[in-house]
Amino acid sequence: MADDRSSFEQRIKQKLADADVLRRCSANQTLKRMEQIDHRSHQFNEAASRVMRDIIRPRMEILTSQFDNATLTDSDEQQNLRCVCVFGRTARYPAETRLDIGIGHDGEIENLLLSYNLQILPVFIRFDRHDEMACPLDEVDDNRFAAWVENKIEQFVDTYLSLEHSPQYQRENLVTDPVCGMTINKTVATSQAKHQGKAHYFCTEDCHRAFVEHPERYIAALAT
């Protein structure tokens, strides 16, 4: 019986010893994995900072400089991972618009991700709201990133300029030239004149002059 207990005790000790070996192996693997993640995290931060500084932000600054109603901001001031251009509503572009180009990574920090997000409110037209490009962190290609960012910004400009020709967005700007009766967009009218506190818009200078000479005649015609 004593020999049986001794054998039993040895088997228990062996199990505990095996478990201890597994525990140490697991701890070593976890430490190694954490070291790898920490290395990739530093690698990502360096690459993301460079891409934002040298590629994304300069191109967003060029975009912003072309529009009086645009403001450039950083949505994450600590890490500076997103560059956001906000376009205020104007008569010419009657929509609240936000263009966001940022940098992120996947769960294992193996790939650097560029993201494109566009918001236009109200929504009256179709447009690409989101796109993303991935690149292995060990193979970051600045030229490829620059080409992608430029393409997305040019795509945005095409979309934004289309607001100027969209009936849904421009319906509040459509007015009637009181002289010739033509429907025109007041944001591109050649001139305007006020009569009794109300602004009137004209498609040509000839219409403008005719109205200024005899405003009552054309106001009466509009009323009929």
Image (tube, rainbow, N blue to C red):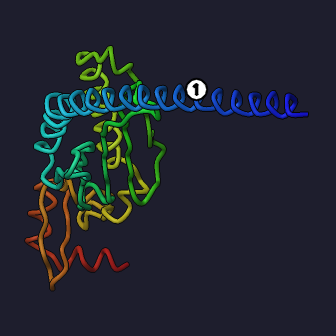
Q: Percent from the top left, x then y, of residue 4?
A: 87, 30
Q: Quadrant of the N terminus?
A: top right
The image quarter containing residue 110 is top left
As shown in the figure, which amino acid type bears the numbered disc 1? Val
Is 13 situated above or below 168? above
Is 170 situated above or below 41? below
Q: Percent from the top left, x then y, of residue 156?
A: 32, 38
**Which residue lies at the image location 19% right of the left edge and 56% below the top edge?**
189
Foreground residue, 6 or 147?
A: 6
| Circle 1 residue | 21
Foreground residue, 185 or 47?
A: 47
Is 209 situated above or below 146? below
Left or right: where does residue 8 sit relative to residue 115? right
The image quarter containing residue 69 is bottom left
Foreground residue, 210 or 90?
A: 90
Q: Percent from the top left, x then y, of residue 193?
A: 12, 70
Q: Percent from the top left, x then y, of residue 119?
A: 39, 51
* SS under mark 1: helix
Left or right: where does residue 60 sit relative to residue 122? left
Left or right: where does residue 167 sit relative to residue 200? right
Residue reaching furthest to the front: 2
Q: Quadrant of the C terminus?
A: bottom left
**Which residue lies at the image location 32% right of the left edge and 54% below the top edge?**
97
